[in-house]
Amino acid sequence: MKISYRRWSLTQENEQKAWESKKVDSENLAEAHRQLWQGYLKFIQEHVQIKQSDRILDIGCGPWGLINYINMGDRYGFDPLMDYFLEEFDMPKDIKFLKGVAEEIPFKNNFFDLVMVTNVLDHARQPLRILNEVKRVLKPNGILVLSIDCNGPLYKF
């Protein structure tokens, strides 16, 4: 599946508008995101032994991604709206944040020990290409944390 660049661009514009409205209450939203990520963090702590030397990538991290709440390793956050997030939000200084699309991850092969892709594939132009890129940059024995949050018609109910 591949969506048009125009459709993807409109989605990115809407995403930025949504974050713009959230800036007003950023302290409470940061805490809400911390709560949101607790299940993921618990899962990671139970199943992944993160070492200080590990390289960790959070694709589509936004300003309060999962990467913000992991306190070990060489951490990278990656998002198409990263320039906006860095300008408008108080982002952690000990994480390397980069702007880009996950269909073209700018790292060499077998670079990361852990890659996290949370709620990204359903926002992407080419999900399969992203998975191939993740496979390329993830070390042979690396770990992928992948989730997709789809809010269907019953979600509001």
Image: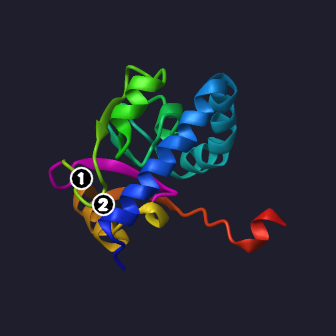
Q: Nearer the viewer, residue 36 or 84?
A: 84
Task: Give the residue at x 31% y 56%.
Answer: 102
Q: Quadrant of residue 21?
A: top right
Q: Is 137 on the left-hand or right-hand side of 17?
A: left
The residue wearing badge 2 is 134
Asked if labels 1 and 2 touch by Cβ distance under 8 angstroms, the answer is yes
Residues in magenta, as a range: 107-120
Q: Nearer the viewer, residue 104 or 142?
A: 104
Label 1 sits on what residue type? Ile
Which mark lies nearer to you, 2 or 1?
A: 1
Task: Give the residue at x 20% y 54%.
Answer: 110
Q: Earlier in the sequence, mark 2 or mark 1?
A: 1
| Residue 147 seen in the current view | yes
The residue wearing badge 1 is 105
Judged from the image, the secondary structure of the residue bearing numbered disc 1 is loop
Taking the magenta stretch, the answer to whether it contains residue 31 is no
